[in-house]
Amino acid sequence: VQLQASGGGSAQPGGSLRISCAVSGFTLDDYVVGWFRQAPGKEREGVLCVRRDGTITHYKGSVKGRFTAARDNAKNTMYLHMNSLRPEDTAVYYCAASRTYECSIRQSRYDYWGQGTLVTVSS
């Protein structure tokens, strides 16, 4: 089982980035997808969650309207689209998969995790 994250990197404030998370070893259709982030010196926190039907729950009010996510079950890949980036979005971003039917911000509910990818927003 593997979740391989790619993308991320550096952006200026107001810019956009996309993170992809390719899954292998299981079928993404059967999983809820969560995106989390850990800023320097802070605990990892939930960003948003994508249900099996594609509906999204945002856990961070500050990203609502700026971050969205998608899943391509045919490609076994999930995506996090980040727009209007701010310096406070700087963090390591993680994708995760949970074999449940409902979203959860509880990290213990997630069965598999990606390795994390760094996003840096600065001018």
Image (cartoon, rainbow, N blue to C red):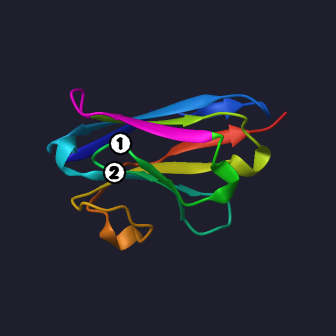
Q: Which label belongs to residue 51? A: 2
Mark 1 vs mark 2, CA separation in Å: 5 Å
Residue behind mark 1 = 54
Say which quarter of the image contains residue 22: top left
Q: Is residue 112 placed above or below 7 in the rendered structure?
A: below
Q: Is residue 69 magenta?
A: yes
Left or right of residue 111, residue 40 in this image: right
Badge 1 vs badge 2, beta-carbon distance below 8 Å: yes
Residue under the point 40% across and 68% down: 107
Measuring from the top left, give residue 67's x and y in whole percent: 59, 41
Dot 2 amino acid type:
Arg
Quarter of the picture holding the C terminus: top right
Give, as a single range, the part of the protein colored magenta.
Answer: 67-76
For the residue labelled by badge 2, is the local secondary structure a helix, a strand or a loop? loop
Q: Is residue 21 magenta?
A: no
Residue under the point 37% across and 61% down: 103
